[in-house]
């Protein structure tokens, strides 16, 4: 039989949602939802992508969280503009996430 303090601790943990989850082997979905520093293995949210210019169809490599304006090398068209988080692609641009 568990002591009264141990029972109250288990009840508090159950309220926080720790009853059914395994802390050593969390699911991919729960890890994806967590903040980048609170994951089991810390990692970045950003990624590199190939962006195709809508005018000349040249491909430019852009970081997903670019902090400066990205311009196409071939035709000097703005391809991506910075925001507070992820960069906003120009309308008509298509992109592909680069494999890691």
Image: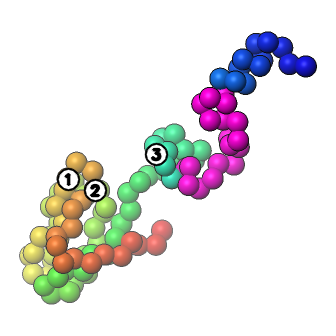
Q: In the image, is residue 5 above or below residue 53? A: above
Residue 82 shown left or right of residue 41 in the figure: left
Q: Is residue 53 among the parts visible in the rendering?
A: yes
Residue bearing the label numbered 3? 36
Label 1 vs label 2: CA separation? 6 Å
Cβ–Cβ under 8 Å for marks 2 and 3: no
SS for callout 1: loop
Residue numbers of the magenta segment: 13-31
Residue, disc 2: 86
Q: Residues within 10 Å of mark 1 (few under 14, many from 20)?
A: few
Q: Nearer the viewer, residue 88 or 46?
A: 88
Q: Is residue 22 magenta?
A: yes
Q: Are marks 1 and 2 in contact (CB under 8 Å)?
A: yes
Q: Is 14 in front, or is 68?
A: 14
The reply to whether the magenta stretch includes residue 76 is no
Q: Position of residue 82 (x, y in %)?
A: 19, 56
Q: Quarter of the image holding residue 19?
A: top right
Decide: is 84 above or below 100. Answer: above
Whole-percent x, y for residue 81 in the image: 16, 61
Where, quadrant-wise, is the N terminus in this rendering? top right
Give the Cα separation between the discs numbered 1 and 3.
Answer: 19 Å
Residue carrying label 1 = 83
Badge 3: residue crowd in 10 Å (few <14, some 14–19, many ≥20): some
Residue farthest bottom in this picture? 56
Q: Cα distance, mark 2 to mark 3?
A: 15 Å
Q: Position of residue 45 (x, y in %)?
A: 41, 54
In the rendered image, which quarter is residue 7 located in?
top right
Q: Is residue 24 visible?
A: no
């Amino acid at each position: 039989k568990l002591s009264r303090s141990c029972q109250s601790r288990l009840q508090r943990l159950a309220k926080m949602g720790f009853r059914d989850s395994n802390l050593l082997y969390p699911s991919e979905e729960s890890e994806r939802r967590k903040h980048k520093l609170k994951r089991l293995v810390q990692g970045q949210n950003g990624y590199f992508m190939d962006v195709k210019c809508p005018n000349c169809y040249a491909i430019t490599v852009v970081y997903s969280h670019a902090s400066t304006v990205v311009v196409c090398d071939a035709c000097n068209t703005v391809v991506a503009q910075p925001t507070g988080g992820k960069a906003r692609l120009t309308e008509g641009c298509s992109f592909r996430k680069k494999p890691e």
